Amino acid sequence: MSVTSTDMPAPRPWQRRIVVALAVLAVGHSVVLAFWLSPQSPVRQVIGGRALATYVNPYFEQSWSGLAPNAQFVDESFLVRAQVRDDDAGKNRVTAWVDITAAENDALRHDLDPARTHLMARKLATNLNGAMFGLNAKQRALVRETYTKDPTTLLRGRLLAAGADRRAAVETYMTYDLMATRFASMYAQARVEGRVIAVQYRVGRRTVPPVSEVATSSLRDKDFRWFTFGYRLGYRASFEAQSAFDDYVKD
């Protein structure tokens, strides 16, 4: 009866050499970082701060802000304004821009489990920014036009005519344009007196500064890159849907 051995085969010499080399590199790297982080000392002076900096920067430099639980690398914004009709006075007016994402940030600052409804504006901004980066320059110019009298189906056709090779990007944008128009209409209707007849939205995006600037600037110091869209015909929601949205806005 044969017996199968369960003993592991002995490592080969070249395997031992690789493991030893990796261990030496790891120990050496740890020692250099330890000297880099340590206060001034005779040993550190012998090594030289310049030599340590040459090794550590920029490949192993780490900002403590990057380890923070609230670290943020991309910031996006969703703004809305509306044309409102006062039927009693027979006049139209345009509201000021409302930064919905900023309002949500203030409302949810200490909320550990926010409702999904409070994340809608930021998700729309993320999706619309992504859609816009998928369009070409001519298509981006077309979305800035107003569509309150003409249906947005005309916009779809014009976008495809301006770049037939970007059909997927066009369909993606048109989907999020519809969602943003409805969201903006219901949000504006919940905040204003009168009848919302048209809405306009814009989305912004900014990213963290490069590593070379993190010591002097942060994400909040950066300007947004804006995409502004033309007016869209206001969406009239059902009474039940608008009532639920009113509760969300005023929550």
Image: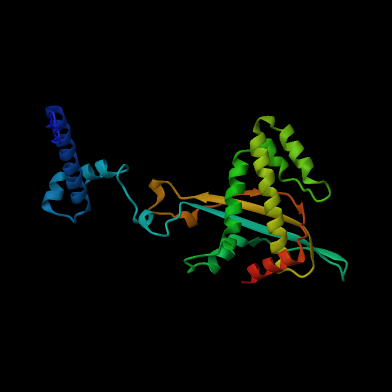
Return the residue nearer the eye: 196 or 227. Answer: 196
Say which of 29 and 241 sits in front. Answer: 241
Q: Is residue 138 above or below residue 203?
A: above
Please indicate whether residue 226 sits to the left or right of residue 56 in the image: right
Q: Residue at x 17, y 55 (%)?
A: 40
Q: Is residue 71 left or right of residue 190?
A: left
Residue at horizontal 60%, vertical 52%?
125
What percent of the width, then of the height, locates residue 160? 72, 34
Q: Quadrant of the C terminus?
A: bottom right
Residue 175 sits above or below residue 164 on the image: below
Residue 192: image quadrant is bottom right
Residue 91 location, quadrant: bottom right
Q: Nearer the viewer, residue 171 or 135?
A: 171
Position in image of residue 82 (x %, y %): 74, 60
Work out whether residue 96 can be spotted: no
Report the residue at 86% width, 68% height from top. 87
Q: Residue at x 71, y 56 (%)?
A: 182
Residue 151 pos. (x, y %): 80, 46
Up/down of 136 relative to 202, above or below: above
